[in-house]
Each structure stands twice: as C-alpha cells, then as structure tokens.
Amino acid sequence: QVQLVESGGGLVKPGGSLTLSCAASGFTFSDYYMSWIRQAPGKGLEWLSYIRGSGGTVYYADSAKGRFTVSRDNAKNSLYLQMNSLRAEDTAVYYCARNRWDSSGYTYFDLWGRGTLVTVSS
Amino acid sequence: QSVLTQPPSVSGAPGQRVTISCTGSSSNIGAGYDVHWYQQLPGTAPKLLIYGNNNRPSGVPDRFSGSKSGTSASLAITGLQAEDEADYYCQSYDSSLSGYVVFGGGTKLAVL
C-alpha cells in the first residue's frame, strides 16, 4: 500500500551525527518532491527541507541550513536526512512526507510516515 | 512563536460545532496563499485534513470544512465526535521568510 516508513532514529550525543532514512512504497517515488518535517516533544510541526523528485534541487529551512543534508535514491525508493553537529534542541520526532502542490503552486503534504525519534543527550 | 497563530485549545460537546482559527498576515494568508489543515491524533503522525483552503482528500468526512477570509482561515468541525479529539495544524506559505512552509502552532481539540 501507499506508505512511508522512517528509520534510523535513536540516542546521539551532542555534536554527533545521524542519518535518517525514509522508505517509500505504493507510488512512483521519483514523481514526487519529498520533505522532512520534525516535531519536538510536546511542540508543533517544523518543516526542514524538501527535495525535487529528480533529486537535483533541495530547499532548506534556516534551522536546517549548514547542518542537515537531504538526499534521495530513486532506485531504492528512499529519502535520507543526514544530520551533523546535533544539539539538544534537535531532539524531535522526524517525519518524512510527500509533497503536493496547490492551485497557486505552493506545497502541502498529503502522505506522512509514522516518524522516527531522535534524542540528543549526553 | 509561529507565523500563523492558532488558539492553544478549543473544546466542544459531542454533536456540537467547533471552529479553529488560523490568523496570519499580509505576507502569508492575506497575500492569497492557500491554507491547508492537518489532524494529529494522539501518538500518531499528522494526516492531511483540508487542502487548498476548503478541499477534502478522499476519505475525510464532510463534517470537516475549511474557509479563508482576509488574513485568517478557519477549520470547522460539525457533529463533533469523540474520535475528533486531536491536535490540528494549519499550514501555508510566507513570502517574507526564507523558509517555504509555515505551520501554525497547533490547537488541541477536547471533546467534552
């Protein structure tokens, strides 16, 4: 069925690195832009980045620029989020989501994974 | 503070109608950008509820509806049910930010 499944979360020390994965199934992955969105414990949603279907262009929120890198492997139907120099404030559930476009050409998200928890703590 | 402002909580009794507001500014909702809504049931991932201000994805009951006027948008839920208890988020685009996506802070709906 159509789904997204994240993996790779866990406990990491401040300053450490982690790479998250998102496996897509049930749709033509390469046809869609894909995003990473996070949610700190008890907090709201924060968009981090999205990447074109071809993988050629990536857009980042200011909070993700410089430390986070998004990539994809369309042959493996997979999306990745590499996170470096992690801080306590990066502790969150990280979701991957499929982008859709409204009538004006701006994005929203019609399919979400269940998320993977990243905890940054010593 | 979120660019889009939502009330932290709303409540209603079963069968009642509730509305959740999402207030923006001239650089987002007021500029004409569409508003989208998500429902997040306890312990689960967000789910698209309304897109393009007032469109429901397949499978979303018609008890849920969206509207937009000026610099604000609203989500209305009629015939409130216990399973509607969840967090609700609005989302749009803001032309003044380098980010491409903005979310509201979320509203917790309690069904009394």
Image: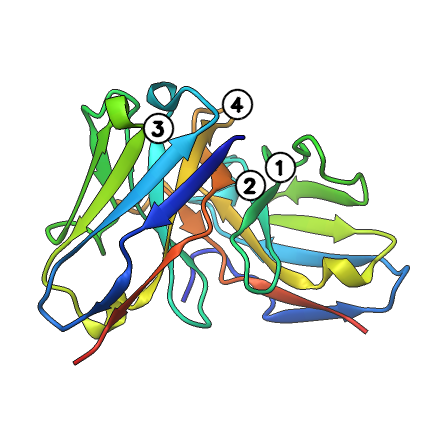
Residue A8 lies, with reference to residue B93, above or below; the image says below
Q: Which residue is mark 3?
A: A33
Density class for disc 1 (Cα within 10 Å; few <14, some 14-19, many ≥20) is many
Based on the displayed image, in which of its 4 quarters is residue A22 positioned? Answer: top left
Q: Tell me the CA gap for discs 2 and 1.
A: 5 Å
Q: Tell me the CA gap for discs 2 and 3.
A: 19 Å
Q: Are marks 2 and 4 in contact (CB under 8 Å)?
A: no
Q: Which residue is mark 2?
A: B35
* Residue A89 located left or right of residue A33: left
Please give the name of the residue rendered at 49% of the width and 62% of the height, measured from the top-left corner. Answer: B105
Q: Tell me the CA gap for discs 1 and 4.
A: 10 Å
Q: Of the residues tagged 4 and 3, which is closer to the observer?
A: 3
Residue A49 image label: none
> What chain does badge 2 belong to?
B
Q: Of the residues tagged 2 and 3, which is closer to the observer?
A: 3
Residue sitting nearer the eye, A80 or B94: A80
Residue A103 image label: 4
> What chain does badge 4 belong to?
A
Q: Tell me the CA gap for discs 1 and 3.
A: 21 Å
Q: Tell me the CA gap for discs 2 and 4.
A: 11 Å
- Identify the element where label 4 is drawn: loop
Residue sitting nearer the eye, B2 or A50: A50
Q: Are marks 2 and 1 in contact (CB under 8 Å)?
A: yes
